[in-house]
Amino acid sequence: MSESESESMSWLMRDIRRARKQGPDAVARRRGDRLADLVAHARSASPYYRELYRGLPERIDDPTLLPVTDKKQLMDHFDDWPTDRDITFEKVRAFTDDPDLIGRRFLGRYLVATTSGTSGRRGLFVLDDRYMSVSSAVSSRVLASWLGPLGVARAVARGGRFAQLVATEGHYVGFAGYSRMALEGGGRSKLLRAFSVHEPMAKLVAELNDYRPAFVIGYASTIMLLTAEQEAGRLHIDPVLIEPAGETMSESDTDRIAKAFGAKVRTMYSATECTYLSHGCVEGWYHVNDDWAVLEPVDADLRPTPAGEFSHTVLVSNLANRVQPFLRYDLGDSVMVRPDPCPCGATSPAIRVQGRAGDILSFPSGRGDDVRLAPLAFSSLFDRMPGVELFQIEQTEPSTLRVRMVKAPGADADHVWRNAHDGLTRLLADNKLDNVTVERAEEPPRQGDGGKYRTIIPHAAA
């Protein structure tokens, strides 16, 4: 899996358990050594980092010595960023333009994932096997800690099946990783099935009722829609664990999910750039997996934010991915570090996240009820649409969507709009919302506080 046999999956699992058992000092040593190793590798093999780190000390195990990066900078310097010099923007873009290649190995070696992120700007990311194995090892440890022996036994009794709610019409990391597992086989592939968040709710409910998963993992907004279906009696599944991800949830949200399904609810805060960044605890905090990741809350001047205060943004370093290093990467979210020890007993940093709230759109159906659609249904549609540099969908009236776009350089604005209009019209028709009007805006997307572009704006928030 990795460049070193010493980092096999079994070694990773043992090392993660050993680090937690040995305590924070042992975790910190591993983190410092891994950061120093990754910085040295990036300097030697990536022209972008070689220039960016010119003049810095030879060994760096303190992330604050490094300059900050972000998606725009890295994408603007794409061809100089990877440490594998066979990787180019044109090759990756051609790969992601082909849906038949989802989950297949790019250049025979790598997983490719795309994302629009909170800013609406598309990212093209290349992930190596080391990253995927670290992510899998961390996830396995976290799952075991969430369930405990009794929970594991209950999950086995229910067949141990995982339902993964993902966007299935693009190279998103969840579906790309699932597709690779399905293509390459193995025992785990027999217990995991992907369900498309693009499907009409009635069809998704019927499929889940037939599958009867022990675990439900996926986008928080879709899980909230399924919770309403479970409460109404149309969905009737009995999972052991529900894991919402991708969007911030309130305590009342997680309590509602737990009550509706009679299951444990544990959340995750992560990103394509670092899928194993943190995991939720019983107290409702996220704990950073800090042996393989660095998380730095900072203010607008990139100075450390004191514990107990929400940051302007957060910088993340992924210590596993060596092919496209993410070092002091501005993720764009506002987080707060807990100033005292978490009552759950975990010693890793505990954080709360203020960003990433999912906005569910609710439309009158014309039949006396409402149809609710998760924001991912819209954002993933635009993310895979050629020619779109930036987008924003605002629900200006209950049955009206106004679409603001910035086209990519060289793209024909009218052609891009026709594709956007046709895609949105099909999405709405699939959900029996032919009464909803789609308008083309002449103005560009509006920036919110802090300079971010909110991609989905419901009517109540407009």
Image: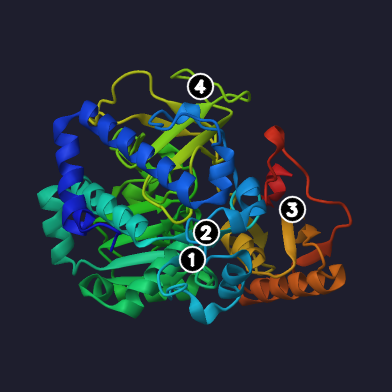
Is residue 348 found left or right of 399 in the rendered image?
A: left
Q: Which residue in the protein does label 4 denote? A: 304
* 1 or 3: mark nearer the eye: 1
Q: Which residue in the protein does label 3 denote? A: 394
Is residue 389 found left or right of 252 in the rendered image?
A: right
Q: Label 4, label 2: how many angstroms apart (C-alpha)?
A: 27 Å
Is 182 drawn above or below residue 160 in the view shown? below
Say which residue appears at 18% left-offset and 45% top-offset: 15
Q: Earlier in the sequence, mark 1 or mark 2?
A: 1
Q: Nearer the viewer, residue 395 or 233?
A: 395
Say which residue appears at 73% left-offset and 59% top-offset: 389
Q: Residue furthest bottom?
A: 100
Inspect the image, locate mark 4, and give the three-letter code of the amino acid beneath it.
Pro
Asked if the residue at tag 2 contacts the one at tag 1, i.e. Cβ–Cβ closer than 8 Å, the answer is yes
Is 360 drawn above or below residue 174 in the view shown? above
Q: Earlier in the sequence, mark 4 or mark 3?
A: 4
Q: Label 4, label 3: how many angstroms apart (C-alpha)?
A: 35 Å
Say which residue appears at 25% left-offset and 68% top-offset: 161
The quadrant of the image that shows the C terminus is: top right
Asked if the residue at tag 3 contacts the one at tag 4, i.e. Cβ–Cβ closer than 8 Å, the answer is no
Mark 4 Cα shell of 10 Å, populated few (<14), some (14-19), many (≥20): some
Q: Earlier in the sequence, mark 1 or mark 3?
A: 1
Q: Which residue in the protein does label 1 denote? A: 112
The quadrant of the image that shows the N terminus is: bottom left
Q: Which residue in the protein does label 2 denote? A: 125
Q: Nearer the viewer, residue 304 or 357?
A: 304
